[in-house]
């Protein structure tokens, strides 16, 4: 598959690749220069539980999940 570098330095991944690998806008990638003209593109892994709070906050039952302020774990153990 071929693609073209835009005047803004952007490269579009072909739709077939995006669909096959479940890629979507906003996903982060790392790019590594291997050699002149040779590069490696790797999708960065999500952190564990990334997006969990947003998912819980979107719960259809109103008020089921409400984020609370946290004082940190130090206060739970009497450490400060």
Image (cartoon, rainbow, N blue to C red):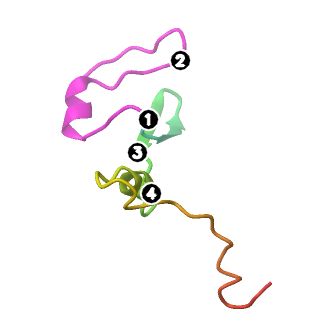
Mark 2 to mark 4 CA distance (whole Å): 34 Å
Indicate which disc residue 43 carries.
3
Relative to 58, does residue 48 appear above or below in the rendering? below
Between disc 3 and disc 1, whose residue precedes? 1
From the viewer's perspective, tell me whether residue 80 is left or right of residue 13. Answer: right
From the viewer's perspective, tell me whether residue 72 is left or right of residue 39. Answer: right
Helix, strand or loop at mark 2: loop
Is the C-beta separation of discs 1 and 2 under 8 Å? Answer: no
The residue furthest right is 80
Between disc 3 and disc 4, whose residue precedes? 3
Helix, strand or loop at mark 3: strand
Q: Where is residue 73 in the image (x, y as percent from the top left)?
A: 65, 79
Mark 1 to mark 4 CA distance (whole Å): 18 Å
The residue furthest bottom is 78
Indicate which disc residue 53 carries.
4
Q: Which residue was labeled with disc 2?
A: 9
Seen at 67% across and 90% down, the residue is 77
Task: Say which of marks 1 and 2 sits in front.
Answer: 1
From the viewer's perspective, tell me whether residue 56 is left or right of residue 79. Answer: left
Quarter of the figure that contains the N terminus: top left
Q: How many labels does the image show?
A: 4
Q: Where is residue 41 in the image (x, y as percent from the top left)?
A: 42, 39
Is the C-beta separation of discs 3 and 4 under 8 Å? Answer: no
């Amino acid at each position: 598959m071929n693609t073209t570098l835009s005047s803004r330095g952007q490269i579009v991944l072909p739709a077939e690749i995006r669909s096959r690998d479940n890629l979507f806008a906003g996903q982060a990638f790392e790019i590594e220069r291997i050699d002149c003209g040779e590069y490696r593109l790797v999708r960065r892994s999500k952190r564990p539980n990334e997006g969990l709070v947003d998912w819980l906050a979107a719960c259809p039952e109103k008020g089921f999940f409400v984020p609370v302020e946290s004082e940190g774990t130090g206060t739970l153990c009497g450490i400060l």
